[in-house]
Amino acid sequence: MKIEEKLKWIQPIVFKQMQQTVKQNQLAHAYLFEGVSGTGKKDLALWLAASLFCQNPHDHLPCEECSTCVRVLQHQHPDVIEIAPDGLSIKVEQVRDLKAEFSKSGVEGKQKVFIVEDVEKMTIGAANSLLKFLEEPDGKVVAFLLTTAKQRLLPTILSRCQLIHFQPLSKKRLLAELEKKELPVSQASLLVHLTNSLETAIEMSQDEWFNEARKIIWKWFVLVSKKEQQGFVFVQTDIMPHFKDREHYLLVIDLLLLAYRDALMLNYEAVDILAYPQHQEILKETAGRFNGAHLTEALETILLSRKKLESNVNAQGVFEQLSLLLI
C-alpha cells in the first residue's frame, strides 16, 4: 500500500489539509505533529519530505515511485535527516550534529528536511539548541517534530511550529480491520487497547514473545486478584525471566491494567470492548468479589507503579511491591 493510500485511511482530514498545502506550495518551515503512537505522524512527515524532492510530481504531490521518493521513504536520502532518542532522551550532541549537517550545502539540492521523533524526550540543552535552530533556519529547511506529549515541550518551541493534531483511530474501526485480517477476537481485542496502528497490531499478533507475555500477565492477574500469596513469588519465577527491558516492564503494567479495567467495566455494566473477552467469566467473578471503589483503587495503584518504572526504579522491586499491595 502506498503511503498516500494509508494516510487517506488513517488520517483523512489531516491528509486532505496537508495535501492542499503541498499543492499550493505553502509548506511552513516547522511543524509539530502531535498524537498517540500509530496515527501516521512519521508516514506523513516522510510523504511531505518526498513531495519536496520528487522527480515526477503530479500537482506538486510525490509519485512515491521515482528513485528520489523511494530513497526518502526508505530513510536513505542524504538531505532528509532523521533523529530519534538515543536511549531515554535526545541529547544536545544529536542536535549539534544536526545543525552541523545543515550548515553544509545540500547533497542533491538546496532543500533540506529534518524529522525528530519523540521530540518531547529532548534534554533541556537539546531543546534550547533546537529552539535556536528553529528561530534562525539556515537556508531552505523544513522541520517535522513528532510527539505524543506536546505538554512536555518548551512553550517557545510550540510557538515556533505549526501544530497538527492526529486523531487516534477508533478501537472499533481497528478491531474491524483486524478481524478482516482473520485475527482471533481474543488477540484483536487486546491489541486495539495497546496500539493505534494496524501494522503494529498485526506484527504483535505474530510475535511469539508477545503472545507468551500476555498469557503470563493474565496468570499474574488471576493470582493477585484472588489474593493468593503465590502472586508475589510469580514475579521472580515467571515475570522477570520473560520481561527483560524497560519497554517490556511497561508492557507488564499495561497488560495488568487492562485486566483490572475489564473487571471494573463489568462491575459497572459499562462494557465496550473488553481486552480479555475470552476470560469474561473469570472477569465477572473478579468484578463480583470487589466493589467499584476497590477496583478503582487497584487501577490507581497500578498506574503509580508505572510512574515508578518510568523513573527507572528497579522493576522487580516495583512488581513485587505491586503484588503485595494488590494481594
Image: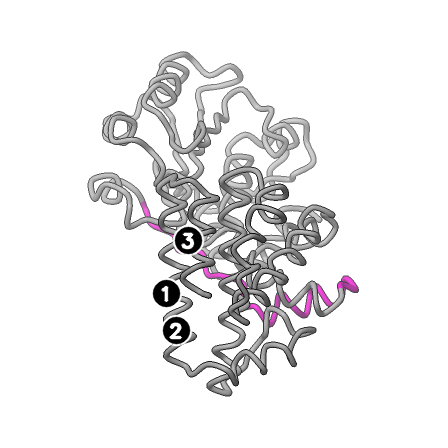
Q: Is residue 298 above or below residue 7?
A: below
Q: Amino acid at mark 2?
A: Thr
Q: Amino acid at mark 3?
A: Gln
Q: Is residue 281 above or below residue 82?
A: below
Q: Quadrant of residue 139?
A: top left
Residue carrying label 1 = 300
In the displayed orientation, state which residue is furthest to the bottom: 269
Residue at 23% across / 41% down in the picture? Answer: 154
Residue at 46% across / 16% down in the picture? Answer: 106
Say which element carries label 1: helix
Relative depth, front residue between 67 and 71: 71
Q: Which residues are drawn in magenta?
A: 162-183
Percent across and percent down for residue 262 are: 54, 74
- The answer to if 174 sits in the magenta stretch is yes
In the displayed orientation, state which residue is furthest to the top: 104
Say which element carries label 3: helix
Categorize mark 3 by other alpha carbons within 10 Å: few (<14), some (14-19), many (20+): some
Residue carrying label 2 = 296
Q: Which mark is residue 71?
A: none
Residue carrying label 3 = 321
Relative depth, front residue between 50 and 39: 39
Percent across and percent down for residue 191 are: 62, 60
Residue at 46% across / 66% down in the picture? Answer: 327
Percent across and percent down for residue 284 are: 58, 82
Task: Kindly report the distance in space between the C-alpha atoms of the residues bearing marks 3 and 1.
Answer: 14 Å
74 displayed left or right of 38: right
